[in-house]
Amino acid sequence: MEIAAPIVPTLTIASTPLASRLLLGTGGIANLAQLRDLIAVSNPGMVTVAMRRFDASGDGSLLKIILDSGVPILPNTAGCLTAREAILTAQLAREALGTSFVKLEVIADEHSLLPDPFELLRAAERLADEGFQVLAYSNDDPVLARRLAEVGCVAVMPLGAPIGSGLGILNPYNIATIVAEAEVPIVLDAGLGTASEAAAAMELGCDAVLVATAITRAKDPVAMARAFALGVAAGALARGAGRIPPLNEARASSAMSGRLRTNG
Amino acid sequence: MSSIEIWLNGEAIYVEEGLSIDALLYRQRLPRQGVAVAQNETVVPRTEWTRPLVAGDRLEILTVAPGG
């Protein structure tokens, strides 16, 4: 008898069905050929890009590779320090790329790279009002996550740990709380270091995971991209399968009755 | 024809009065696709790139770059 392998249910964000629950960040890619390979092996649901002042060194290939892949492009507002900067960057991204999706980042400073919750919320509300599909990069704060959803974000992206740190999920309790209350998809974003942490994020109930540095700066980025794709899928399946509750004592899995006995 | 000073991506440049955004893009060898223009912190839709530049204009021309 053949049993069909269980498949991970499709995630839809703002009416857009995604090919997978791994979103790929392009920050740190070694070159454009590598990006093509990373997309091919990880089958990402979306691919992020930053928006930067035009520089003659760019020749449009980055955009072409992403458009040719057919994966939805997710421009971000990385590096913006105020709502005003982030709003203008988002508006320019929409004009340049013809997408209303934006990964909204408003950081408090250039050292911690942590989101500034006040500027973030202000920018999110304004962009949602302007018709953007805002995926908000957020602290792992359940209250902020709720407020971001309330002002119209289509997804909230709490950090596992600071950007690029590879520390994993520092506060799984907060992530689980955010998930439990969520009325929009929750995408674990930032701070992951390896594939098992992506599985853990999915097992906590996250709807997707966004990874850049952990893949692009791995010793073998293509192998790590595949590992993350598998980790995300494994975690999603495990979450759906329903794990056993942890116990503080052993419970035999073999029947205790009917065992042989020897004399001493 | 007199020239005016404008700011292009944070750098001062001189262009002749009446030059359009479209003509500036052409002169700077900037692509038409995958870029967007803000004039004094307001996005200029590409249908309005024929608009002439004004002295003191601050232009931002953005495109995609690798980023998480």
Image (cartoon, rainbow, N blue to C red):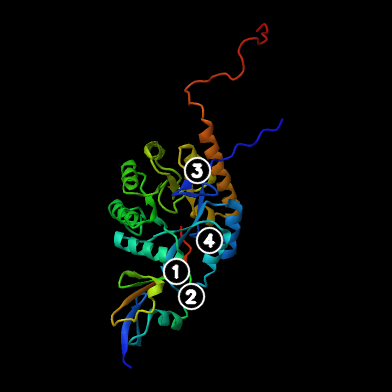
Q: Which amino acid does label 3 sit on?
A: Glu
Tell me where residue B19 appears, x and y as whole percent. 36, 85
The chain letter under disc 4 is: A
Height in image: A141 above or below A1? below
Are circles 1 and 3 on residues that touch, CB within 8 Å? no
Q: Which residue lies furthest to the bottom in this view?
A: B1
Location of mark 3 (residue): A197
Task: Determine which residue is flagged by label 1.
Answer: B63
Q: Bin the neighbour count of mark 2 within 10 Å (Cα to Cα): few under 14, some 14-19, many 20 and up.
A: some
* Chain of the residue under label 1: B
Q: Which of A197 and A38 is in front in this view?
A: A38
Question: Which residue matches tag 4?
Answer: A29
Mark-to-mark CA distance, 1 and 4: 17 Å
Front tag of 1 and 3: 1
Task: Locate residue A24, reporting x and y percent.
Answer: 51, 54
Disc 3: CA contacts within 10 A as few (<14), some (14-19) or many (>=20): many
Please tell me in which quadrant of the rendered image residue B2 appears. Answer: bottom left
Residue A42 point in image, percent of width and height? 58, 51
Disc 4 with disc 2 on a shared chain: no
- Nearer to us: label 1 or label 4: 1
Proximity of marks 1 and 2: CB atoms separated by less than 8 Å: yes
Element class at badge 3 = helix
Label 4 is placed on what type of residue?
A: Ile
Whether residue A18 appears in this view of the structure is yes
Q: Name the residue under label 2.
A: B31
How many discs mark residues in the rendered view? 4
Structural distance between the alpha carbons of marks 2 and 3? 40 Å
